[in-house]
Amino acid sequence: MALPVIREDMTSDELDKMMASACDASTLLKAISHEGRLMILCHLVTGEKSVTELEHLLHARQAAVSQQLARLRLEGLVTPRREGKTIFYSLTDERPRRILEVIYELFCSTDDADQVKKAAE
């Protein structure tokens, strides 16, 4: 997919649409910019998890996990499902998964991370 080119002859409607998309992207990036929320999304990529499972996986207190899940829910990135007293969360759509794949490639994959660091030097 090619990135858009901003041209001087763009109409105000085209620029408005681009600005709206930039605002949407910025909101999503702000939502995942916290390491706790990012780790929650990383765990949810593998499938639905309960709040208790996330607490154990993250070694975090329930209040902290719930606060981060609330923000992810507000941004439409996760969807809750209640089963009795247990609440399960899953990714709402493929956006977080696709972004996490790029983040993983750039920062977590040993070979790629070493290449990025060397290129930056």
Image (spheres, grey):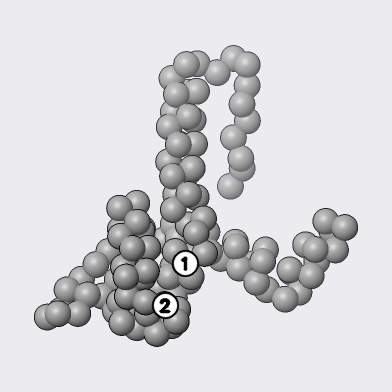
**Horizontal and vertical percent position of residue 25:** 47, 44
Using residue 29 as the reference point, say whether residue 84 is left or right of it.
Answer: left
Left or right of residue 89, residue 14 in this image: right
Query: Would you say residue 19 is visible in this rendering?
Result: yes
What amino acid type should be assigned to the residue bearing mark 2? Ala
Q: Are marks 1 and 2 in contact (CB under 8 Å)?
A: yes
Could you say where residue 80 lies in the image, as x and y percent from the top left? 24, 67
Circle 2 sits on which residue? 60
Q: Nearer the viewer, mark 1 or mark 2?
A: 2
Q: Nearer the viewer, residue 7 or 79?
A: 79
Q: Nearer the viewer, residue 60 or 93?
A: 60
Query: What residue is rendered at 44% in x and 44% in y?
Result: 27
* Quarter occupied by residue 109: bottom right
Q: Badge 1 is on which residue?
A: 36
SS for callout 1: helix
Which residue is rendered at x = 47% and y = 67% of the image?
Answer: 36
The residues tagged by marks 1 and 2 sit, at their Cα atoms, a distance apart of 9 Å
- Residue 28 screen position, x and y as percent: 44, 49
Q: Residue furthest left?
A: 84
What quarter of the picture does the C terminus occupy?
bottom right
- Residue 52 is tagged as none
Label 2 SS: loop
